[in-house]
Image (cartoon, rainbow, N blue to C red):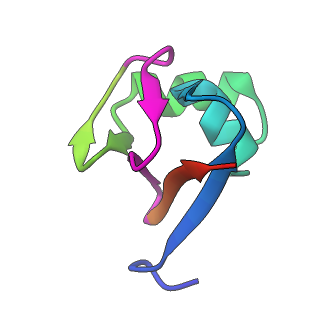
Amino acid sequence: MSSHEIIDIPIRDDMIRLGQLLKLASLVDDGVEATELIKNGLVQVNGEIDERRGRQLHHGDTVTVNGETVRITAG
């Protein structure tokens, strides 16, 4: 995958939390890994570092980890 390619991740609800999205999008293996990446400032939400695992994400938000970017879409 190119570092500039954005993968759409459909969700059923209006909102998903950051930690949940990282697992859903297979950007991390588990919640512990998600917590560590977020805590260490390695996760960007809409282009800005966000250190809140419970951050609420909505349709159209993008999340970038390790050069991979995903975008939330309506499921």
Count up the numbered dots: 0
**In front: 43, or 45?**
45
User: Per the image, is 4 magenta?
Assistant: no
Q: Is residue 57 in the magenta section?
A: yes
Q: Answer left or right for 44 relative to 15.
A: left
Question: Where is residue 36, by image quadrant?
Answer: top right
Residue 66, image x, y percentages: 47, 58
Which of 58 and 24 lies nearest the eye of the viewer?
58
Q: Determine the residue positioned at 62% across, 37% down.
A: 21
Q: Which residue is at a point 28% across and 46% down the rendered structure image?
A: 46
Q: Which residues are magenta?
A: 52-67
Is 16 above or below relative to 49?
above
Q: Is residue 24 above or below residue 30?
A: below
In percent of width and height, residue 56 lies at 45, 21
* 23 left or right, relative to 8: right
User: In the rendering, at what x and y percent does residue 61 appear?
Assistant: 39, 45
Left or right: 36 in relation to 57: right
Residue under the point 40% across and 50% down: 60
**Quadrant of residue 34 within the rendered picture:** top right
Question: Residue extending furthest right?
Answer: 29
Q: Identify the residue at horizontal 57%, vertical 68% (top origin).
A: 7
Pick the quarter of the image with the N terminus: bottom right
